[in-house]
Amino acid sequence: MKVKNEYQQWFDTVEITDKSELDHLAAQATTSAYQKIDCLECAKCCLTTVTTFTESDIQSAAKSLAMSSKNFKKQYLFMDLDGNYTTQNVPCPFLDLDDHKCKIYDNRPHACRSFPHTHKDHFLTRKRVHIENAKFCGITTYVLDTLKTNFTKTR
């Protein structure tokens, strides 16, 4: 049997009666984490995961690369089983591997803009995503560690 990771164990044992308080603490921890961690130096999300693009994201990114949306989709994306457009492989094709700069940063998709999603309301609905993201994302790890320390089952 696989041993549960520490964050899964915390989620399994913590007694959360005020979900809005958890959302608030997670948002505060996210703000604090961004002051301590430079995502642009890390880029592990771009190096290890695919990202999703909405039609609006596709239009914006394609325009920034002076491409048609059709060619952008053909060159960089595929439709997954859920009907979402995602990058074809990792690392992200828009990541410059030398300096970790995004080639479409000003026009990056919403999924990238809001990553790692720890600041959003309904934190608990994404707990599996947070647990997975904690494997590589310093922001997520910081937020979960803060919650583990400040939101215990004695609350």
Image (cartoon, rainbow, N blue to C red):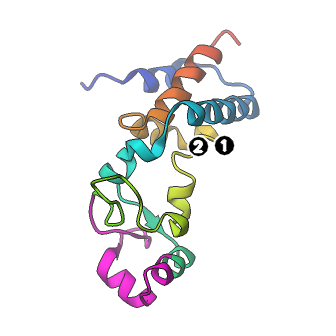
SS assignment at label 2: helix
Rendered view: 58 above or below 149: below
Residue 68 sits inside the magenta stretch: yes
User: Is residue 37 one of those drawn in magenta?
Assistant: no
Amino acid under disc 1: His
Start and end of the magenta stretch? 61-90
**Quarter the N terminus occupies:** top left
Q: Report the residue at 36% width, 66% height from top.
A: 94
Q: Mark 1 highlights which residue? A: 122
Give the quarter of the image for residue 26: top right
Residue at the top extreme of this rendering: 154
Towards the viewer: 39 or 83:
39
Task: Name the kind of residue labelled 2 in the image.
Answer: Thr
Say whether residue 28 is left or right of residue 35. right
Image point 28% across, 55% down: which residue? Answer: 97
Place of residue 118 in the rendered image (x, y in percent of width and height, measured from the top left): 58, 40
Is 92 situated above or below 68? above
Where is the C terminus found, in terms of image quarters?
top right
Tag 2–tag 1 contact (CB < 8 Å): yes
Label count reads 2
Task: Tell me the residue at 54%/78% (across/down).
Answer: 60
Position above or below: 120 against 150: below
Name the residue that disc number 2 marks: 125
Q: Pinpoint residue 98: horizontal percent, then vertical percent.
A: 27, 54
Judge left or right: residue 25 versus residue 61.
right
Kindly state the secondary structure of the residue where label 1 is placed.
Answer: loop
For residue 73, above or below residue 144: below
Residue 9, x across and y down, in percent: 45, 21
Give the image location of residue 51, x and y in percent: 41, 61
